Structures are given as C-alpha cells and as structure tokens.
Image: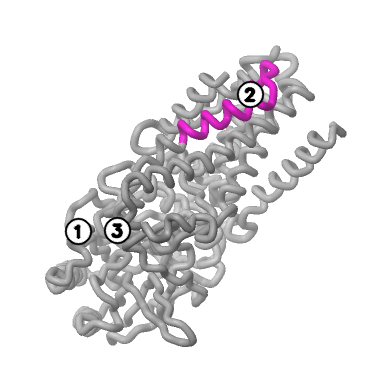
Amino acid sequence: MLLSGALSGVLLVLSFPTWGHPLAAWVALVPLLVTMAGGAPPRLAFSAGLVAGLVHFAGILPWLTQVMMQFGGMPRPLAMVLNGLLILYLATFPAAWATLTALLLRRFGSLALMAAAPIWLTTELARLWLLGGFPWELLGYSQTSVLPVAQLASLFGVHGVTLIVVLVNSAVAMALVAPWRTVRTPMLATAGVVAAVVVFGTVRLADNRLVESGTPLRVGLVQGNITQDQKWDPALSASILERYLSLSRDTARDGAELIVWPESATPFGFEEHPGGEAIRQLARDTGAHLLFGSTQRQQDTVARLFNAAFTLGPDGRTKAVYHKRHLVPFGEYVPLSSLLFFAQPLVESIVPFTPGTGPLTLPIGPHLTSTAICYEIIYPALVRSFVREGSQLLTTITNDAWYGRSAAPHQHFQQATMRAIEQGRYLVRAANTGISGVVDPYGRVLARSGLFETTILNAEVRLIDGLTVYGRIGDLLAYLCLVVTLITSVGVWTGRW
C-alpha cells in the first residue's frame, strides 16, 4: 500500500508545472483510493497518505531550501531541516484524508469513495488557515490551463475545481473496485456533473462579455531583471533606478497609462532616499500613474517596517500605500518563534516586517485597483476582499528572483492566473526577473515574459465592475464540505456510524 501512496504522490507532482500535465490530476489519487477500498486498516492508510504527501510536496517544493538560504540567510543544513519539517507537516493533510476515507470505506464499502472529495477539500481548507496557512498549489490549480474546467472557479473558487477533480478520481477508483450495478448511479451522477462543468465553462468562454465591458486602460509592466546579488548593493542603486526609469519611459511612449514595477523595485526606501524624487518626476514627465513596490518605515510608539506598494498620480504625488498582509515565513518573519527559538539567531539577514492593516484598494484616477504583494496572491479570500472593496483591476507585484529557474515561478504564475478567473477581473503581474504577464478575466494569458530577461510588456485591460458568484459567496462550498467532514468524523470516531 505504501507503493500506491508513492505512485499517487508522483502523479500529483506530475499534475503541476513544470514536470507534467493537468490530466494527471484526474487520476492521481486513484492508486491510493483503490488500495484503500480493498479494506486497508486506518493506520496503514495514514502511512500511505503520508507517503503520498511526502512525495508530492518534496516534488513541488524543492526550491524552498534555496529560498530560505537566500531570503532568510540560513545555512544550508538548517534550511534543509526546516524545509523537511514543512514538507512533513504538509504531508499530514493527505494522511488525515486517507485515514478518514479508509474508516468510511471499512464501514460503508466502495460507495464511501464519494466522500473522498469533500474530505480532501476540507484538508485543503485547513492547509489554507492553520499556522498562518501555506496553500501553495492546491489541487484545483492543476486545471488553470484547462479553461473550460477552470471557469468553475468563477462560481466556487479554486476549491470548486479541486472538488470536481477529486470527485472524478473517486469515480474512476469506484469503477475499478465495484460492480457496475452498485456504482452505476454515482458514476452517472459524476459524469453528469463533469459534463455540466464543461458546458458551463465553454459557454462562459464563448460569451466573452467581460472583455467587452468596462473602461479600457493601457498598462505597462516593467521587468527590471535585477539579480539578488545586485539588488541591495549600494554601488548599483543608481544604475538600477535608471534602468527602471528608462524602461518606464519606453512603455510610456507606447501609451501606458498605468506603469507597474515589481515588489521592492526600488533598491532603497522610497520615502527616505533622494532617488524617490526621480520616480515622482517620472510620473510628471510621462503623465502616467505609477504602482511600484518599496519599503516604508513608520514611527509611532514603536518603529515598524512594511513591505509596501505605492501609487503615484500623474502629478507625482503619493495617492495611496498598501502594506503587505501575508508575510513570507523565514523571510519576512519567523513563525512560531517561541517554538523555533533555535532558528532565530541563525536567520542573520532577516528584517522583521510588520503585517499590514491599511487600505485594500489603490486609486488610479477615478478608478480603483489593488495589488497582492508576492505570495499574497495565493490567498483567494484576500484577493476577494480587494474586489469587494471596489477593485476594478487586480495587480500583483513580486520578486521571484529567489526561485532561480526552478518550477516555482511557473507555479506562482499559475496560481495568480486563477485569481483572475475567480474574480472576473483582468490581472497584471510585474515580476522582477519574471514571469510578468497580463491575464484576462477568463484566465487567458494575453502577454507573458520569460525568466531572467529585461523587458517591458504593454497591453490593454478593462476596469470591470460587478461580482462573480464566487465574489459574492466566497468559500461557501468549501465550508459546507468542512461541516460535512466534521459531522462524519464525529460519527465515525464515536462509533455511531
């Protein structure tokens, strides 16, 4: 059974960039489910689920060790240990899923396979929130490029896509272990649901009304391509700034009304350095709005440092500042510092940032936009809150130089794309070393840069009003699955079922 867990883990890895294909996700859990349906005891199911999780997360997160070393300044041995602990922690979620599913299978037989989908969704919801959350590459993200299926996210978010994928896994497993007369009804029901999802997605894509509504806006993205060893070198700060200014003038000549720079684009604190005036003058010279990442210090009762996004108007004045809310663990703060006290002295280059609590939207003339800084974009509820506060355009700024040429920049871009579908908004993404891009409200990539190239991207987007169904109801489906799973768990553990 442990081999079936390992096989499922490999198939899960092959469901995500850059190794595999989204089709792998539709059968990734089948080996594990088929084995559990044979009457596997819960302890063995837990072990197999743990193996699946270890293989899965070790396969999609190997780059985290390098990030901890560069971003957090950790020695390699400590970074490897902490990454291993994170992978072990994440693996407990599929292990818990396998355990509860196995218990239900022992009590109710193969029909209990259909419960695997809401249980899996509950574990993903838990992964989103527990210990600050690390919802990297939830299973539904595997279908971001399968546009007819991905449109389901406009109704139920990425969790809805996860649910349908696991439901199909369950149906395939059921077809392999049970006679047709037993599984005919759930199999036909699953086929009907999948058909409805595909029809809905196809119709939504053909409708295309979102790209024909709203006020057009010409945006320009600047990808400065500054490597980490250059970024904070004081001797290079003037040349880095000049690169951004020059590229911005180029994109302004192409008609950009909004120019977007990446996270921490300025190699200095914008409000504290003389170079800040050159950026203000750029806005005045081009007549464009600017949105860019920098740091901001505030001194009240205590000194606080924020990872911030600034917007400047065509007059060069600051219109609003957004402070990053979801900080990067072991890069911008040390999580569970009381328990991981041994790590604190070794995180030599870490600068403790303060999580933001300020405004969610940024004005662009009479319109509103918003920005998610770095991995904030993987939090669906945060981006939904931007739109509910009136954001007509989603932006995300990031510095993915830490990831090198690993799969991480591709995974990060994939998850950002899902936010556009969920909210029915254009999304523009400015990344220091790539991948920068523009995505329409249906998840179609209109422009995309390569990695580690100095470039600009220009595109026309629309400032859109209104809410998708997901924008209105949020993660209601996921929380319903949570309630069902909790009731089921209580029934199983108390012996009432």
Q: Which residues are magenta?
A: 36-56
Residue identifier under label 1 = 229
Instruction: Name the secondary structure under disc 1.
Output: helix
Q: Is residue 118 left or right of residue 203?
A: right
- Is 45 displayed left or right of 202 in the figure? right
Q: Nearest the camera: 145 or 484?
A: 484
Q: Quadrant of the N terminus?
A: top right
Q: Quadrant of residue 291?
A: bottom left
Q: Quadrant of residue 72?
A: bottom left
As drawn, 134 above or below 112: below
Give the mark nearest the N terminus, 3 or 2. Answer: 2
- Residue 282 versus residue 40 in the image, above or below: below
Query: Is there CB contact under 8 Å for labels 2 and 1?
Result: no
Question: Image point 31% across, 61% down: which residue?
Answer: 430
Residue 172 lies, in percent from the top left, at 59, 22
Q: Position of residue 166 (x, y in %)?
A: 59, 33
Give the CA distance from mark 3 to mark 2. Answer: 44 Å
Please tell me whether mark 2 sits on a helix, a strand or a loop.
Answer: helix
Please state which of residues 233 and 241 is positioned toward the viewer in this rendering: 233
Residue with the mark numbered 2: 44
Q: Amino acid at mark 2?
A: Leu
Q: Quick check: 48 above or below 401?
A: above
SS label for mark 3: strand
Q: Is residue 159 visible?
A: yes
The picture places residue 152, in percent across and down from the top left corner, at: 55, 45
Residue 206 makes an appearance in the image: no
Residue 431, which numbered label?
3
Image point (26%, 48%), residue name: 404
